[in-house]
Image (cartoon, rainbow, N blue to C red):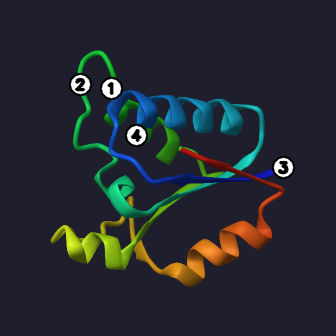
Amino acid sequence: MKLGFILSTNNAETNWNAFRLANLAVSKGDMVTVFLIGEGVEYNKNSSTQFDIKRQINKLLKSDNSRIIACGTCMNIREQKGSKECPAGGIKDLYELIINSDKVITF
């Protein structure tokens, strides 16, 4: 199954749970794409011992069945740059995620 995750918050607990679910889906054989929009581009800003988002992201990115894309416009507003792990994309990428996914989950 192809799952699309849309993450639009920088809330640590919410992001931690979103990435935990994404990792579970990948472990079950699903293809997962996470699109970060708005405050979601700050997804790892509040990583902590309790909500270790960075650990969940690193686990997710080890799989060939997952990827993360961030809204380039939202990153520019926050003076952030894309990276190899989290490249900047655009609204077209979000549209393609939606039409190509079997299910879309929003956080």
The residue tagged 2 is 48
In this view, the residue in front, 14 or 30, is 14
Q: Earlier in the sequence, mark 4 or mark 3?
A: 3
Mark 4 and mark 3: span between their CA atoms? Answer: 22 Å
**Disc assigned to residue 1:** 3
Mark 2 and mark 4: span between their CA atoms? Answer: 14 Å
Q: Where is residue 83 drawn, in percent x and y?
A: 30, 66
Under circle 2, the secondary element is loop
Q: Is residue 75 left or right of residue 57?
A: left
Q: Are marks 4 and 3 in contact (CB under 8 Å)?
A: no
Residue type at the position of mark 2:
Ser
Under circle 4, the secondary element is helix
Under circle 1, the secondary element is loop
Q: Where is residue 48 drawn, in percent x and y?
A: 23, 25
Mark 4 and mark 1: span between their CA atoms? Answer: 10 Å
**Disc assigned to residue 58:** 4
Q: Residue at x 36, y 77 (%)?
A: 72
Residue type at the position of mark 3:
Met
Q: Residue at x 33, y 56 (%)?
A: 39
The residue tagged 1 is 52
Q: Are marks 3 and 1 in contact (CB under 8 Å)?
A: no
Q: Within 10 angstroms of label 4, few (less than 14), some, or many (20 or more) residues?
A: few
Residue type at the position of mark 4:
Asn
Extreme residue in the top direction: 50
Q: Earlier in the sequence, mark 2 or mark 3?
A: 3
Q: Residue at x 78, y 72 (%)?
A: 99
In this view, the mark in front (2 or 4): 2
Does residue 81 sit above or below 21 in this rendering?
Answer: below
In this view, the mark in front (2 or 3): 2
Q: Are marks 1 and 2 in contact (CB under 8 Å)?
A: yes
Q: Earlier in the sequence, mark 4 or mark 1?
A: 1
Q: Earlier in the sequence, mark 2 or mark 4?
A: 2
